[in-house]
Amino acid sequence: MNIDELYQTIILDHYREKHHSGLRDGYGAEVHHVNPSCGDELTLRVHLDGDTIADISYEGEGCSISQASTSVMTDLLIGGTTAHALELHDRFLEMMQSQGRIAPDEDVFEDAIAFAGVSKFPARVKCALLGWSAMRDATLQATTKEN
């Protein structure tokens, strides 16, 4: 199995078995994002415990890339700090806008490295960023409410 096939497998696995899917109560902020270019939609909730992301839950409809990217993101961010989540958002955004020129650090991105290949397809970049953008907005809203 080559690396591209491995990445496709990771994306399809997360699409079929979405981690943290299903909206849960006890949240600090909820956002709804839509990708107008393809129609993908996502409602995402963030629950903070101080500066820790205690939970991220979501419900969405869309392509395998948007759904899998959100699933992978939740695994990476739940239990970490808000500062770490926002930093990873920025790094993921940079990788997605690189058109394949930035090789992600597997120790940092774990399964999210599977989306490095997606960055070569500009039409799909917004799909991969949908959940990350929603998380950023919800985290910033929840942080503002707590202060």
Image (spheres, grey):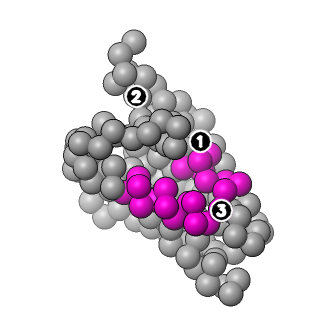
Residue range of the region highlighted in magenta in the rendering: 73-93
> Residue 101 at x, y = what percent?
23, 42
In three-dimensional space, the C-alpha distance between marks 1 and 2, rounded to whole angstroms, equals 15 Å
User: In the image shown, does 81 or 115 lie closer to the viewer?
Assistant: 81
User: In the image shown, does 43 or 71 lie closer to the viewer?
Assistant: 71
Q: Is residue 102 above or below residue 83?
A: above
Q: Looking at the picture, which amino acid does disc 1 mark?
A: Lys
Q: Looking at the picture, which amino acid does disc 2 mark?
A: Gln
Q: Looking at the picture, which amino acid does disc 3 mark?
A: Thr
Q: Is residue 97 above or below residue 14?
A: below
The crowd level at tag 2 (other Cα within 10 Å; few <14, some 14-19, many 20+) is: some
Report if residue 84 lies within the magenta region: yes
Taking the image as shown, residue 126 lies to the left or right of residue 137, namely left
> Residue 2 at x, y = what percent?
35, 16
Question: Which residue shows up at 61% across the image and 66% down it?
Answer: 82
Look at the image and tell me whether residue 27 can be seen.
no
List the residue tagged with mark 3.
Answer: 81
User: In the image shown, does 134 or 42 lie closer to the viewer?
Assistant: 134
Look at the image and tell me whether residue 3 can be seen.
yes
Which comes sooner in the sequence, label 1 or label 2?
2
Report if residue 26 lies within the magenta region: no
List the residue tagged with mark 1.
Answer: 18
